[in-house]
Amino acid sequence: MNLQHKQALVTGASQGIGKTIALRLAQSGADIALNVLQADERSEQVRQQIEAMGRRCVVLPFDVSKLGPMRAALEHAARELGTLDILVNNAGIQKRADFLDVSEADYDRVMEVNLKAAFFLTQAFAAQCKAAGRGGKVINISSVHEDLPFPHFASYCVSKGGTKMMMRNLAIELAPLGITVNNIAPGAIETPINAQLLNDPKLHQALLANIPLGRLGQREDVAGVAAFLASSEADYITGTTTVVDGGLLWNYAEQ
């Protein structure tokens, strides 16, 4: 995918899927604004990898749920790189609890990071695009759990279901500005967050039994879709969710 002369912001990009997407967009030619909660050795390594490709990279340490720092960071990115063309809302968290035990604090934090942040980041991004008189691409990293129930993770599912409807609504509202809005819904992806599952043969095999393709997804499987949606080849695609799950969604059964 050719993303030459494009600028992309990827949130939650120091590890996992976010890091892989940032590197893939850079490989395709984009300059990268790299959001992390805190600048550290991991974000510095990603920055160095991107700059080694001949791309520009600015690290933006801010909490995506805090609107003041977020808006200031987007303005900083625009000054350093130019008006952003691509926004990847990747930052996300989950809190495990039986429904009767979910705390207000945990519920609020999941909603703030997974839904509120994507909503207002997209708002700030769209305002930049409008002011510059150009379109843009919004890509939300959602989850198969925007459709699939996930017992003990009710707040996470609510946030991802909200992300689905947000995407559909904003796709319509932002289309006159030339801004497309799409979701990617990963299934079971081999990332550090799944380390416990990967190290438990019984849990691992039970999960694989639900995946028709017989393997966990790789971060590159998600990043490839993101690069496509960010490119001009996806200019006529908006308001959709692309599921990246090896067939899990329509084959899953709770054990």
Image (spheres, grey):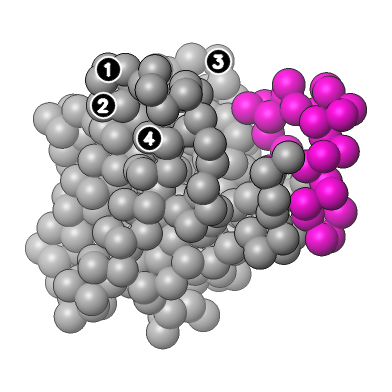
Which residue carries the number 2 mark?
108
Mark 3 is surrounded, within 10 Å at the Cα level, by few (under 14), some (14 to 19) or many (20 or more) other residues, namely few
Which quadrant of the structure image shows residue 110?
Answer: top left
* Label 4 or label 1, whichever comes before in sequence order: 1
Task: Name the kind of residue labelled 3 in the image.
Answer: Glu
Could you tell which of marks 1 and 3 lies nearer the N-terminus? 3
User: How far apart are the alpha carbons under marks 2 and 3?
Assistant: 29 Å
Q: Which residue does the image show at 41% across and 27% down from the upper left?
A: 99
Residue at disc 1, secondary structure: helix
Q: Earlier in the sequence, mark 4 or mark 2?
A: 2
Q: Residue at x 51, y 30 (%)?
A: 152
Decide: marks 2, 1 in contact (CB < 8 A)?
Answer: yes
Q: Which residue is tagged 3?
A: 41
- Specify the segment rendered in magenta: 189-215
Q: Nearer the viewer, mark 3 or mark 4?
A: 4
Name the residue carrying label 4.
155
Q: Residue at x 38, y 35 (%)?
A: 155
Q: Which residue is mark 1?
A: 105
